């Protein structure tokens, strides 16, 4: 059973991190790594051992063009437009995963 869990973690990380599974990527995207492990096992109970299903459950962070550290200045017209685009992208992503 442990073998299947480890394979599921490996497969899900390959899919979620887009084949870039190295120490640097794991440190930078640690939140996704923890989400993968949380989707596979909860309180010691194994929930899923299929890496593809786990990867589908993980909601991905925005792409490189909209980073989570980007500050949006809502006091300007450009900031309001950026905020609207970010909201639209989040809504579309959420609707796709339903």
Image: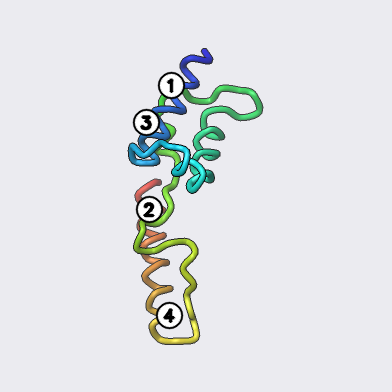
Label 4, label 2: how far apart the Cα atoms are: 22 Å
Label 3, label 2: how far apart the Cα atoms are: 19 Å
Residue 38 placed where, x, y %?
56, 34
Of the two numbered discs 4 and 2 on the same chain, state the one appearing first in sequence: 4
Q: Which residue is mark 4?
A: 80
Q: Which residue is mark 1?
A: 7
Disc 2 secondary structure class: helix
Near-viewer residue (92 or 38):
38
Label 1, label 3: how far apart the Cα atoms are: 11 Å
Give me the residue at 39% from left, 46% from top.
97
Disc 4 secondary structure class: helix
Q: Which mark is residue 52?
A: 3
Q: Which mark is residue 95?
A: 2
Which image quadrant is residue 85 in?
A: bottom left
Residue closest to the far right: 43
Circle 1 residues within 10 Å: few <14, some 14–19, many ≥20: some
Using the image, determine if residue 90 lies above or below residue 83. above
């Amino acid at each position: 059973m442990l073998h299947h869990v480890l394979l599921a973690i490996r497969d899900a990380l390959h899919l979620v991190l887009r084949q870039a599974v190295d120490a640097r990527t794991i440190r930078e995207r640690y939140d996704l790594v923890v989400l993968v492990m949380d989707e596979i096992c909860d309180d010691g109970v194994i929930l899923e051992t299929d890496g593809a299903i786990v990867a589908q459950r993980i909601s991905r962070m925005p792409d490189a063009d909209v980073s989570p550290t980007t500050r949006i200045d809502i006091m300007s017209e450009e900031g309001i437009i950026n905020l609207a685009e970010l909201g639209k992208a989040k809504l579309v992503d959420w609707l796709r995963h339903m």
